[in-house]
Image: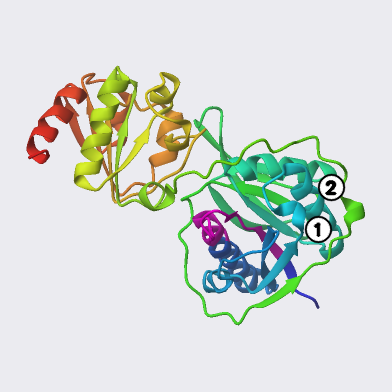
């Protein structure tokens, strides 16, 4: 019997010639599902990495190192920059031909846009922003059980998809990347120009952005500022402290909404998921949607002048004090 297939749609940063860390995390997660299927159901699942680009300089060995048993490369000049229309049309064609059982996307800006376009075209379901994946047997079939926060993070819902491919977007930082020793084959999948309809998008300008993964999603220590910092100037003090101490900076949704920080460093249900060794929250109230993004942190330190702040119910060390004054004291110590 042929193996079942798990496809991982990998994201490649063209201007830096590297794959995003979430691609490696999802390949490792897919291997965990494959292992579970073999041990519990005696069914073989093969893990495929899917790459779209116009011509790539990255080392494909990275994908095999982190769990790709086979790589399918979709190469076309239309992929010289990301266009959701061209990308989705190509993936729909690939999935129709290869018939994967499960498809995983990163819950990144790209994945959150691309996955719904693909699944709606294939008339299948999508579970978004997942924090856990497993396989279960349901009505004689093996199904992907995808778990995600719901009702503002108060409850966790586990969802099964009726049709194949069973698709999910998975948050960054949820799964640890593991190393494997696969001898990976790479297949270049031919795409006919006839599958591409005219895209309504037009690229006006391309601005390379600063790589943040090494200092944010994978950071060992994160300093997070909330709206309790009160001003952008106070948030800049936190940024200075982080630079002096070699830590990464994050923000709560409240701080982002106030304009203190960019959305790309937001932690929480509508932002990133992180799991550092130490997470220090300055002026963060601790709403449930924020907790869902940092609950995997090994040690949490909270600084807030409200002794009844919800963050204190989700921390290891509690400091009832003005967060800005604490930051000022720390700057005095380290800025010498």
- Look at the image and say whether residue 215 sits in the magenta stretch: no
Residue 206: horizontal and vertical position, in percent?
Answer: 60, 41
Read off the magenta span. 6-26
In the displayed structure, does residue 31 sit left or right of residue 173? right
Determine whether 169 is above or below 324 in the image: below
Q: Residue at x 67, y 49 (%)?
A: 81
The residue that mark 2 highlights is: 122
Residue 50: horizontal and vertical position, in percent?
Answer: 68, 62
Residue 334: horizontal and vertical position, in percent?
Answer: 11, 40
Q: Residue at x 56, y 58 (%)?
A: 23
Q: Give the crowd class for mark 2: few <14, some 14-19, many >=20 residues within 10 Å.
A: some
Contact, mark 2 vs mark 1 (Cβ under 8 Å): yes
Which picture quadrant has residue 40? bottom right
Q: Residue at x 67, y 70 (%)?
A: 71
- Secondary structure at numbered mark 1: helix
- Identify the residue at the far front of this view: 205
In the displayed structure, does residue 57 sit left or right of residue 203? left
Question: Relative to the observer, which residue lies in front, 51 or 101?
Answer: 51
Q: Earlier in the sequence, mark 2 or mark 1?
A: 1
């Amino acid at each position: 019997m042929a193996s079942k297939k798990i496809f991982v749609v990998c994201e490649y940063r063209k201007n830096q010639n590297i794959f995003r860390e979430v691609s490696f995390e999802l390949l490792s997660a897919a291997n965990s599902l494959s292992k579970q299927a073999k041990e519990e159901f005696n069914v073989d699942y093969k893990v495929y990495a899917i790459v779209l680009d116009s011509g790539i300089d990255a080392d494909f060995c990275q994908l095999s190192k982190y769990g790709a048993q086979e790589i399918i490369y979709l190469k076309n000049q239309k992929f010289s920059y990301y266009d959701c229309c061209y990308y989705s049309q190509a993936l729909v064609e690939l999935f129709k031909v290869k018939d994967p059982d499960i498809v995983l996307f990163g819950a990144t800006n790209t994945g959150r846009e691309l996955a719904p376009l693909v699944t709606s075209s294939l008339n299948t379901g999508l579970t978004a922003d997942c924090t856990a994946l497993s396989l279960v047997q349901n009505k004689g079939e093996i199904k992907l059980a995808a778990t995600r926060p719901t009702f503002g993070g108060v409850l966790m819902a586990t969802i099964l998809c009726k049709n194949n491919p069973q698709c999910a977007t998975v948050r960054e930082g949820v799964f640890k990347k593991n190393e494997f020793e696969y001898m990976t084959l790479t297949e270049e999948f031919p795409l006919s120009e006839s599958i591409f309809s005219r895209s309504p998008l037009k690229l006006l300008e391309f601005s390379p952005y600063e790589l943040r993964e090494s200092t944010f999603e994978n950071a060992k220590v994160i300093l997070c500022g909330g709206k309790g910092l009160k001003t952008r100037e106070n948030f800049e003090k936190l940024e200075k402290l982080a630079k002096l101490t070699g830590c990464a900076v994050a923000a709560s949704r409240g701080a982002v909404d106030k304009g203190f920080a960019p959305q790309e460093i937001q932690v929480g249900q509508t932002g990133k998921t992180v799991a550092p060794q130490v997470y220090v929250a300055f002026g963060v109230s601790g709403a449930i949607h924020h907790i869902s993004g940092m609950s995997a942190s090994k040690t949490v330190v909270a600084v807030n002048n409200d002794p009844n702040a919800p963050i204190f119910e989700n921390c290891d060390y509690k400091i009832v004090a003005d967060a800005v004054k604490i930051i000022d004291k720390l700057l005095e110590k380290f800025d010498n």
